[in-house]
Image (cartoon, rainbow, N blue to C red):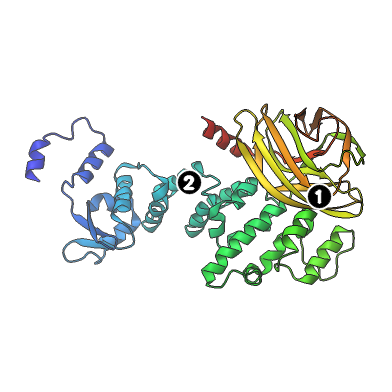
Amino acid sequence: MADLMESLDDWQAGKSLSECNRFMLANEISCDVTFLCGQRREPVKAHRYVLFSRSSVFQSIFSSSLIEADGAFPVSDIDAETFKLLLIYLYTDDVTIELERVDSILYAAKKYAVKGLVQKCLAYLESCMSVENVCTVLEQIHLYDGRNMEDKCLKYIFENGSDVLKSESFGDLSAAHVEQIVKSDELVVDEMDVFNAMMNWSEKECRRKGVSVTDTNRREVLGPFLYHIRFPLMNTMFFTNHVSTRQILNAQEVIAIFQYYHGRDQASNWHFNINKRRGFSLYSVIRYNFIGMNEMDSGTGHHVISVSCSKSILLHGVIVYGCQEGSAEYSVTIEITDEESRKCLSKEHITVKTDKSHHTSDAMLFKTVLLQSGKKYTIVAEINGPPTKIGLDGRRTVVVEGVTFTFISRSNSNTTVEKGQLPGILFTFPKVNNLNKFSDKKS
């Protein structure tokens, strides 16, 4: 210490109060207390006066007999690096916070009643909130009673529901938070995404409980949450192909929902929610004026159409024509390509069931595709099955909800702007956060 003081003669000159405090802490000048941090009991030195003046908890510690005989104080639940960051804030009123350590800093700040640091951590979490981490933040805030911050997390989740429910961290949420999210009318999401998210969450919950992942056990861990999935509002083809074929719902429930689709009144023991979520509106773009049937133009095979839009949209699915007679099942492969980069944005294999009474059916994508304003995209559909109806008198431009869609014919296709398959698309508007995220990736 003597050598240090000789080499740092008049070190205080030109430094502010916080700079002097930081210097004394970093160089352990005249420290009078040692904390043994973490399971490894790593020593971290400090000054009682500073801590006494900044924290009521430290005041209580130094006013009691909790200090060990050698002047050390054990802190087994906080690692040395986190404790040093806590001290830096107490000495300087400032500290650099990083995402991988914010939860441990928040824990330390709450433990020692350092309210300024708690608020700094909460502000940091809000500033870096994203689709990937918002569920993790929600769980952390819940532990530290950050009610205002919890409301902000939920608002973010509701507004970005489709992406958040597909995130890995959604599966790690507590049951209470899952219920709070999924039952809300404010959640902006397609019911198909709710179902898929609940299947992912229930799989993880089965593993957490140590039971095999079966549909029976999924239903068991979901409990009453199951009825927060609004099955009656689902796309009928999705329900038919991906829900009714499983054991998530019992036979009576499946029949009741099919009956609801066909106009039958709800039974007295009906448990399902049929309220439309306020935030979600799925828009359709229809480009043909008339429907025809022609054996020479069967509607099956290779269909290509390009499209551009005046505003950015999220593509949820493609509308296809149904069968000419009776009922039929079609195997549909849909591929979405960015014309400029030639990059394939999505390729999905979808089974579509149709009957003669419905002119069209929705081929819903499992993952939405962001179509940027002013760019051209190519939609390719391979449709295998019996002859379908076709569209006639097609329009090159269609305006829906203030968005101008421009369609362009492509060579080697059974579909053109004027006639053929692919009568329309299904879309929603992306949130600003999604557009910003896309722009950041490009820059």
Q: Is residue 222 left or right of residue 43?
A: right
User: Left or right: where does residue 357 sit relative to residue 301?
Assistant: right
Is residue 348 among what the camera can see? yes
Q: Position of residue 314 (x, y in %)?
A: 68, 39
Q: Residues within 10 Å of mark 1 (few under 14, many from 20)?
A: some
Q: Position of residue 425 (x, y in %)?
A: 77, 39
| Residue drawn at (83%, 66%) of the image | 256
Type of residue at label 2?
Answer: Leu
**Mark 1 → mark 2, Cα distance in angstroms:** 52 Å
Measuring 65% from the left and 56% from the top, which residue is drawn there?
196
Horizontally, residue 367 falls left or right of residue 307, namely left
The residue nearer to you, when weighing 409 against 8, is 409
* Residue behind mark 1: 385
Residue 344: where, in percent of width, then height?
62, 38
Report the residue at 34% width, 56% height from top. Answer: 56
The answer to which of marks 1 and 2 sits earlier in the sequence is 2
Q: Residue 381 or 136: which is nearer the viewer?
A: 381
- For disc 2, the neighbor class at 10 Å (few under 14, some 14 to 19, many from 20) is many
Residue with the mark numbered 2: 125
Q: Secondary structure at mark 1?
A: loop
Specify the amino acid type for callout 1.
Answer: Gly
Quadrant location of residue 43? Answer: bottom left
Q: Nearer the viewer, residue 328 or 366?
A: 328
Left or right, 316 with reference to 29: right
Q: Is residue 282 depicted above or below 233 in this figure?
A: above
Residue at (56%, 46%) from the top-left corner? 131
